[in-house]
Image (cartoon, helix red, strand yellow):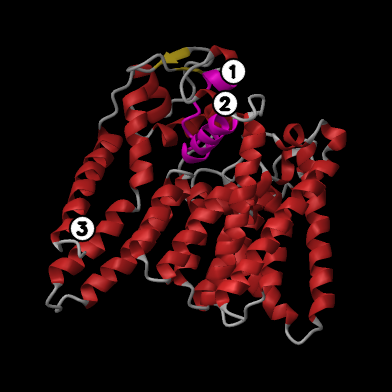
């Protein structure tokens, strides 16, 4: 049985419709605390040694123990 | 003898070689508290923790439960988790470390077999025994038995290159997707596949079935990075940061910059004297230069996909520092293909059995030295 010619294109569009917004969210849409943003994204590593940095969304957290 | 029978014999030989190798490792590890204990050094603890308890904070795991471990990609620990739970039905006390080492051994077999098939299709000279020696005995090859992603990544990336060579593009894309969920450098296979497919699309632009060609082109390109994007979605849902795997690298002192500057600075450091005790920047830089030379050699030999992949696998991590570069080079599947190429040229007209035995003895000796240093957690050369 041959698949319809539009099917691979439709699936590809569906996947790209997930991946491209995900890429944009990765680059510009982080929903994180100011402490997380400063330490990990802006890389101000002189800050928060010994502190706990909470991350939103669940119980996940980061202890900076350097 | 048909190719399938040759490959069947090779597969049996590869399984026997991996089993024998594991036996020798177990014997060497006896003074170090047993194989699982001796092999589990450095990043192994992270993979074990993720395989047993998943991602997220967990006070029972000390630093492994509080430091962010999103830098460690999920496919390898996920497969260990599934296999561990399945095996626990028959052997409830089996440790996750043993399952991880079993998975690495199986992936090493897969890598050796796919690599032999790939070399059969891409090289004029084919010496399966020589390839088996390189795959099993190359000094840094002991990482293929550790609870690290090296063996799985080598198998998946070789599978992607082989499928691409055989023009089975959707299969290649599936391998790429799995590789991109195994290590960050897995994503480097996607542009290789994409360029191949887009060139095919350009060449077929006057065909009558252009719409079918468009679908056949775009579908592999969309599938190839899927592993990474699913992981990004998971991280976004858990942490709020889809690029957490990259951002947490700051904790390992990795800062983005020019990889060539990092390599040059590493060379200038000329700190080979610290090698036995702590990581040497100069040694890491030399390893990176060897890999880039191998990539150039492969490009000259018209193995463009291999050259691009090897160069990318070195330059991407080197852009953020020189840590672990000896491992990234010495356990890279394409670097091993280049070593095989070099060995086939050396073998030339020599008497093969004598050359093979001498070559194997030298590699095995060097691997034993590195393996014992690994057991003692002397991290300078890794």
Q: State the image quarter where residue B298 is shown.
A: bottom right
Q: At x 65% / y 50%, what residue is drawn?
A: B326
The chain identifier of the residue carrying mark 1 reads B
* Occupied quadrant, residue B166: bottom left
> Does the magenta segment cover residue B70?
yes
In the rendered image, the quadrant that contains the C terminus of chain B is top right
Along the viewing direction, whichever of B3 and A63 lies nearer the viewer: B3
Residue designated by label 2: B49
Judged left or right of residue B242, residue B103 is right
Q: Is residue B159 left or right of residue B177?
A: right
Read off the residue under disc 3. A8
Instruction: Specify the farthest residue to the bottom.
Output: B349
Residue at mark 1: B61
Q: Quadrant of the N terminus of chain B?
A: bottom right
- Alpha-carbon neighbours of circle 1 within 10 Å: few (<14), some, or many (≥20)? some
Instruction: Pick whichever, B255 or B247, lies toward us.
Output: B247
Residue at mark 2 to residue at mark 1: CA–CA distance: 7 Å
Marks 2 and 1 share the same chain: yes
């Amino acid at each position: 049985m041959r698949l319809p010619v539009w099917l691979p294109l439709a699936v590809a569009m569906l996947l790209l419709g997930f991946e491209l917004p995900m890429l944009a969210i990765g680059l510009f849409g982080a929903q994180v605390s100011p402490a997380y943003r400063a330490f990990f994204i802006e890389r101000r590593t002189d800050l928060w040694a010994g502190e706990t940095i909470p991350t939103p969304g669940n119980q996940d957290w980061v202890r900076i123990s350097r | 003898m048909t190719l399938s029978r040759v490959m069947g014999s090779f597969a049996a030989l590869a399984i026997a070689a991996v089993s024998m190798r594991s036996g020798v490792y177990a014997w060497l590890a006896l003074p170090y508290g047993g194989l699982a204990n001796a092999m589990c050094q450095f990043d192994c603890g992270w993979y074990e923790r993720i395989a047993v308890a998943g991602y997220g904070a967990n006070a029972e795991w000390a630093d492994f439960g509080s430091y962010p471990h999103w830098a460690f990609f999920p496919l390898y620990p996920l497969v260990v988790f599934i296999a561990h739970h399945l095996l626990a039905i028959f052997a409830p006390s089996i440790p996750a470390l043993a399952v991880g080492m079993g998975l690495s051994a199986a992936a090493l077999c897969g890598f050796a077999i796919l690599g032999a098939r790939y070399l059969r299709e891409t090289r004029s000279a084919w010496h399966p025994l020589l390839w088996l020696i390189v795959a099993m005995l190359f000094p840094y090859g002991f990482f293929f038995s550790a609870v690290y992603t090296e063996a799985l990544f080598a198998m998946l990336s070789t599978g992607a290159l082989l499928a691409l060579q055989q023009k089975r593009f959707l299969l290649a894309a599936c391998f790429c997707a799995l590789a991109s969920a195994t290590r960050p450098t897995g994503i480097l296979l996607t542009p290789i596949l994409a360029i191949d497919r887009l060139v095919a699309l350009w060449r077929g632009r006057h065909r009558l079935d252009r719409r079918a060609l468009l679908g056949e082109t775009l579908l592999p390109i969309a599938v190839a990075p899927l592993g990474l994007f699913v992981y990004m979605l998971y991280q976004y849902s858990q942490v709020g940061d889809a690029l957490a795997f990259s951002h947490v690298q700051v904790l390992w002192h990795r800062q983005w910059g020019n990889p060539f500057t990092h390599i040059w600075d590493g060379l200038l450091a000329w700190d080979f004297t610290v090698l036995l005790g702590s990581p040497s920047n100069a040694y890491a830089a030399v390893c990176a230069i060897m890999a880039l030379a191998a990539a150039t050699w492969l490009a000259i030999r018209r193995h463009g996909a291999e050259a691009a992949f090897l160069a990318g696998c070195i330059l991407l991590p080197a852009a953020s520092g020189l840590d672990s570069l000896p491992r990234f080079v010495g356990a890279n599947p394409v670097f091993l293909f280049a070593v095989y190429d070099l060995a086939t040229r050396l073998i030339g007209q020599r008497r093969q059995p004598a050359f093979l035995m001498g070559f194997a003895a030298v590699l095995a000796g060097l691997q034993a030295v590195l393996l014992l240093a690994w057991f003692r957690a002397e991290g300078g050369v890794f």
